[in-house]
Image (tube, rainbow, N blue to C red):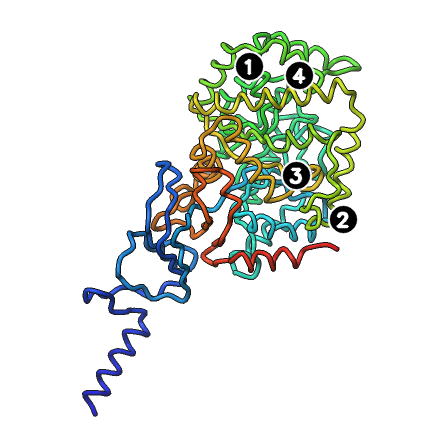
Amino acid sequence: MKFRSGLVGSILGLLTAGLLMANGGRVEEAPYDLVITHANVIDVVAGNVRPDQVVAVRGDVIKLVEKASSKKYAAKRYLDAKGKYLMPGLWDMHVHFRGGDSLIQVNKNLLPLYLAHGITTVRDAGGDMTPALFSWRRQMQAGTLAGPRIFTSGPKIDGPQAYWPGSLEVETPAQIAKALDSLQALKVDYVKIYDSKISGDAYLNVIAAAEKRGMKTTGHMPYSVKLSEAVERGLDATEHLYYVFKACSSKEDSLTALVKKSLTTSKPLGLFAMLPAVDATYSQAAANRIFKLMATRKTAAVPTLFIGKTLAELPDTDHSRDTMLAYIDPKIRRTYTRRLSSAKGQSTEANQFRKKLETRFMSLVPQLQAAGVVVLAGSDSGAFNSFTYPGASLVGEVEMLVQAGLTPAQALRAATINGARFMGVESTAGTIAVGKNADLLLLAQNPFADIQNIRKINTVVSRGKAYSRQDLAAMLQAIKHK
């Protein structure tokens, strides 16, 4: 009896310690929280597929990746991925949570839309509800809220009488220092600069001051500044392609001087007034120069092609029957009217030019990629950006990157590892490897073969928790509006 009791006690002790005897007599650490078996792992860096792999997760971290065998694994949950494709969760590198206190809850309700489309990380590009975002992050970390990981810039930096509420308005060096002090106190992840009112000097000074503090900067850019000047000051990324496009003009110097001169008149020239002249003076030599400089200085580009297409087609498209509208709160739908009214008020000539411009922007993307510029996939989804739906618009963006000329592998890198590298977290995110975050997307078919396969979602894993198609559907049903 003593022998048997001792034996039973030893076995129980092993189990309590989380150890289990596996094939071959080896002792393996167990149990895992999730074991995914027989998965075809998408290697976004190498651009290939590693067949028949086992991926084991404990907590929210990948603890094992190896070739499948007869070996047994103890886990709380198993997921048979035979015939399916496992890739890192998608990153949307340009979203907005905004609209003031009255829209905090309806913005929060958008979080399931990201997970339902395989997006496990987003980068908030400036808004007016930063404390709420930090609260959501704490809730998600605690496991009480489902949603993507969030990086945020906090409030935007702009000039006096800024367009967006909540912006930090700067002009002098002292104001710039105070704004950056406040952002550092908030512990934001980077600095977003906007161009509605900021002067050219203040814009460049923000970049230089942030660079000295070790803070990343991205943003729009006043047309009174050349992109090369911003890049040389240390700009880390340019949002949208309007500013890259201006730098592709053979007359960039004279166009910039014209904008500067107009600022002292009653009719200052803005971005949209200058775009036809920029288009008419496009130069491949100038384009090559700015692409080379961006690549050398490691300034990334966020094309946001999908929102450009969506806005260009607003006058001709009836969105009233969009299936995604059912998941958008009426309070956010009402913010769509501003852009919609503006688009419908444009002349036919202006609408045609807008579409031509989007075609031109599509042509820039493969050139940026070929030149070695880091391309980041971003949707610009959120309140006020009409019919650019959270989740679905990033999927559309990735597909448009391929339509523009990127390979599926390049487009997937733009929506995974490139974002992780840009945010400085590539050691813990962006690929499937031991030690990385367990943020995963299981697809029914190979996205390298057809990029539209990113729509064929079987399971999403966020922070180590697996959500089946049924789970995701239930999450969407909970936020659906009648």
Q: Nearer the viewer, residue 181 or 133?
A: 133
Q: Earlier in the sequence, mark 1 or mark 4?
A: 1
Q: How far is mark 4 from mark 3, CA to CA? A: 23 Å
Check disc 2: other Cα within 10 Å, few if <14, some if 14-19, many if 20+.
few
Q: Please tell me which residue lies in front, 85 or 210.
A: 85
Q: CA distance from mark 3 to mark 2?
A: 15 Å
The amino acid beneath tag 2 is Pro
Q: Which residue is mark 3?
A: 388
The secondary structure type at the circle numbered 2 is helix
437 or 449, which lies in front?
449
Occupied quadrant, residue 357: top right
Percent coordinates x, y for residue 27 in the rendering: 23, 66
> Residue tagged by mark 2?
330
Of all residues, the one furthest to the bottom in this rendering is 1
Q: Amino acid at mark 4?
A: Leu
Q: Tag 4's secondary structure?
A: helix
Q: Quadrant of the C terminus?
A: bottom right
Residue 479 to residue 359: above or below: below
Please name the residue shown 31% across and 71% down the image.
Answer: 17
Q: Residue at x 68, y 46 (%)?
A: 323
* C-alpha separation, residue under disc 2 versus residue under disc 4: 34 Å
- The amino acid at mark 3 is Thr
Numbered disc in front, either 1 or 3: 3
